[in-house]
Amino acid sequence: MSENNRVINLKNIMYQRNIALATTNEAGAVSESDNYSEILEKVRQIITSNHSTELAEVLYKQGSENRLRNLIAKYLNSERLVSNRQGISELTDRIYEDMAGFAFLKKYLEDPDVEEININGFYGTWVLYNDRKILLDENFNSSEDCVSVIKKLSRFGGVILDGSSPVGDSFISKGVRMSSAIYPVVDQERGAIASIRKQKPASITRENLINYGTASEEELDFLVMCVNNGVSVAFAGSTGSGKTADMGYLLSTIDDNTRIVTIEDTQELQLERFDSNSKKLNDVIQLYTKDEPNPKTMLDLLKLSLRLHPTILVPAEMRGVEAMTVQEAGRTGHTIVSTLHAKGAKNAYDRILTMCLEKGSTLSEERLLEMIVEAFPIMVFKRQLKDGSRKYIEIFEATGVDNKVVTGNLLFKFKPGKVERDKDGRIIKINGMHQKVGQISKELAETLRINGVDEELLTKYTE
């Protein structure tokens, strides 16, 4: 018998045992409340608070259903919630379906190759893989069914969708987040809309970045050299281009003794490392923003993080006024690794400028742009191409500002080649290659040299 089968059989035994105990327990046979919604809510609160991992595993792991069912039966018994009118088995099944039933979405949520699921109402669901995008034949049974499933998924992240709060961003599990909306911001006949992004930075390695054609060995070596030697790096691109995954890979190369503080809206970065005895190995603090009531913004947590003495500061995404504090930190001895939305490497500096101006400043735009360039010497622009692949399009070193225009050196560039199409004319592959097209500045070379980079390694980027 395989190890997986042993685990599944053990879960079955435990599940049946709890049902038997609960069914025969006289105390458990008397319900303190015959109201099913109250029972459901109490069990949900207990499991969400104490067993969030087991609850989330239902989304991804085969055979995890019995573990959750076992927990439901256990708490129905221990909390004396078993109704006289229902058997424990029937009540367990009903609560399980209300907590974790996801219709046809389940198999796509479990599929490790699926990167994104976009639900455009009760009919019209798209699934995105690394290399393709598919419109599913399956649909929800009704708009009500669609709303029910989206609400259940939102509750995994503690977000309640209703008429007064019809829009929500929910952190479902590590590296998985969902943005969703229901009536009245969505047509009632459509039900609900949602976008589920399955981000798993821990699975992004040097090897698969190279094998996917995302980046070249030389590009990755250069970025690793920079961030490990005090040179800040930012990733620019659109939503879905994979910026956070690449940032996670880059941070995974940092020495365990280097102090890292990250700030995210939801937990996507998985940086903590442990030994076989569950002892934490690396010096990492991970902070998360908080919505209303009593919000804690990126700016609030940046102020806190600077008091924690980080060597590397990671505001996961710059979107607004916090960019002013980020660039100040980047000019005062902190190495910054961050992301932002922009349509090109040089354009990214203008985007940061716009964010900084939201804060208000007496400095001229020219001077502020010079400060941003100083804070972020290296900018990576990444893009998802029409064949579904993601590429480092440019790696740019900013060196100065001339009449409000950022100047510098284009170091690496993706050069597209032959485009392959299917019989219907759709693009299925864009060939091409990553090329080194320029050298780093003498100033950057000197910074790296002072921080301990060997001369032999530096010559790769100065010649």
Image: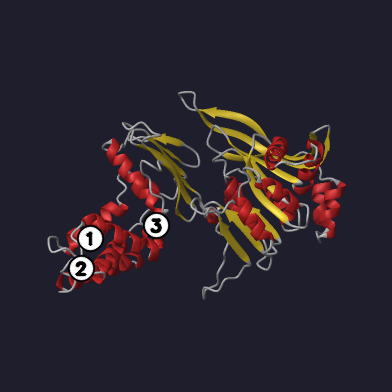
Q: Residue at x 62, y 68 (%)?
A: 282
The residue carrying mark 1 is 92
Which is more toward the observer, 136 or 447?
447
Amino acid type, mark 3: Ala
Say whether residue 283 is visible.
yes
Residue 434, disc: none
| Image quadrant in which you'd find residue 251 | bottom right
Compared to residue 53, the image places residue 22 above or below, namely below
Residue at disc 3, secondary structure:
helix
Which is more toward the observer, 451 or 356?
356
Q: Are marks 2 and 1 in contact (CB under 8 Å)?
A: yes
Amino acid type, mark 1: Thr
Residue at disc 2, secondary structure:
helix
The residue carrying mark 2 is 19
The residue carrying mark 3 is 56
Residue 177 position in % (x across, y down): 47, 48
For the residue carrying disc 3, how many other residues have a C-alpha within 10 Å: few (<14), some (14-19), or many (20+)?
many
Residue at disc 1, secondary structure:
helix
